């Protein structure tokens, strides 16, 4: 089953060490080999990990050494969406740590299991199979509530160095920084997490909240300029992706479940607002299946169980 990292059983203090800053002045010619690789014909047999289960598959890769900020209004299914991202990465045999400070690990696993099998209810044997499948793919940091930025970074570094981790999901930033008003603290956390990603090769997925909407309410999707807190969050992130739920559609269907006009509209808009080392920036319409808690590319596609043992799905 998915392994848990217990806060009181591991000495994370050893991983809070500061990296001694070193000025590395090197001749430009020392980078020739790397430069040659950048200009060499692209003959990759396999891409970096992606979210293969949605349209994002062809738009962004989750490259080592980068930080992606996932942002959106409260209650707009950011955590549910990033859980599906994490599941996709696990299927691609990436080693993933979920550090959710707002939800019990078992609740996160419940969502991911439903997404994996495309069903609202799973039999005991299926849950056993899912738990065994997560071994070597998925770890959970067993802690709820606030956590200091230094300790959060130490947990991620421990996962990278001791467990050969590849991706860590931190949900959410407001549980790491003591107040949204402490802009310097947020800037320092971003600096530390970006440096951590670069030093360890981790891809850090950081969930952040959008500012409370203005007079227009939640009818307008947020942009990277609406992320709550310091501008350093989006400035330093390599990628910024917003997740928005169509609350107007939900309200219409509560009044009349057969409202065809509402059903035809997307349930979510996911927008790649920034991608420093990629090409695409733009928006995708997605539909949401309540039973499986899975995001789908369209309204009509059947929800099929994941193929759980593929190394490469792209």
Image: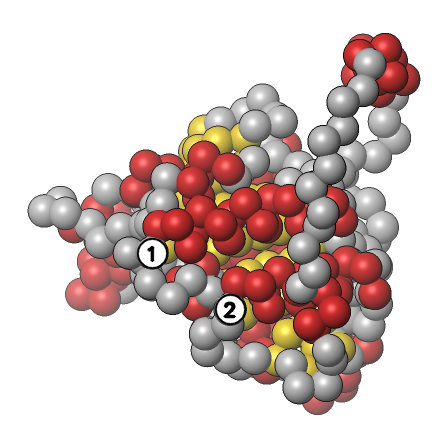
Q: Which residue sits at x=51%, y=53%?
A: 189
Q: Which residue is mark 1?
A: 182
Q: Secondary structure at mark 1?
A: loop
At 88% from the left edge and 30% from the top edge, which residue is drawn? Answer: 45
Report the number of discs: 2
| Viewport quadrant of the N terminus | bottom right
Task: Work out whether 56 lies above or below 305.
Answer: above
In the image, residue 244 lies at what x, y percent? 36, 49
In the image: residue 289, left or right of residue 210: right
Visible residue check, residue 91: no
Q: Residue at x 44, y 47 (%)?
A: 187
Spatial distance from mark 2 to mark 1, Cα to Cα? 13 Å
**Residue 266 numbered tag:** none
Q: Would you say 230 lies left or right of 193 here?
A: left
The residue at the point 82 percent across, 65 percent down is 163
Q: Earlier in the sequence, mark 2 or mark 1?
A: 2
Assess disc 1: are there few (<14), some (14-19) or many (≥20) residues with their C-alpha within 10 Å of its C-alpha.
Answer: few
Q: Mark on residue 148?
A: 2
Question: In the drawing, does residue 41 fall left or right of residue 253?
Answer: right
């Amino acid at each position: 089953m998915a392994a848990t990292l217990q806060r009181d059983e591991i000495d994370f203090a050893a991983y809070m060490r500061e990296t001694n800053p070193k000025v590395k002045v090197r001749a430009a010619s020392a980078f020739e080999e790397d430069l040659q690789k950048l200009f060499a014909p692209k003959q990759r047999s396999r891409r970096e990990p992606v979210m293969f289960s949605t349209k994002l598959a062809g738009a962004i890769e989750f490259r080592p050494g980068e930080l992606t900020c996932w942002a959106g209004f409260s209650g707009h299914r950011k955590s549910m969406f990033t859980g599906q991202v994490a599941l996709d990465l696990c299927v691609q045999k990436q080693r993933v740590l979920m550090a959710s400070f707002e939800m019990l690990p078992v609740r996160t696993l419940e969502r991911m299991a439903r997404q994996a099998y495309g069903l609202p209810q799973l039999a005991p044997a299926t849950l056993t199979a899912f738990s065994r499948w997560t071994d070597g793919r998925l770890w959970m940091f067993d802690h709820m509530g606030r956590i200091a930025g230094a300790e959060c970074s130490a947990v991620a570094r421990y996962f990278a160095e001791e467990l050969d981790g590849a991706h860590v999901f931190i949900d959410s930033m407001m549980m790491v920084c003591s107040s949204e008003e402490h802009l310097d603290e947020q800037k320092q956390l971003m600096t530390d997490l970006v440096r951590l990603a670069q030093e360890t090769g981790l891809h850090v997925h950081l969930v952040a909240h959008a500012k409370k909407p203005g007079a227009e309410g939640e009818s307008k999707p947020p942009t990277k300029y609406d992320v709550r807190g310091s501008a350093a969050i989006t400035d330093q992130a390599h990628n910024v992706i917003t997740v928005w739920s169509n609350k107007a559609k939900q309200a219409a269907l509560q009044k009349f479940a057969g409202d065809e006009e509402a059903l035809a509209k997307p349930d979510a808009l996911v927008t790649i607002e920034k991608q420093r080392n990629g090409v695409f920036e733009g928006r995708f319409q997605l539909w949401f299946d309540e039973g499986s808690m899975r995001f789908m590319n369209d309204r009509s596609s059947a929800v099929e169980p994941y193929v759980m043992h593929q190394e490469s799905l792209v």
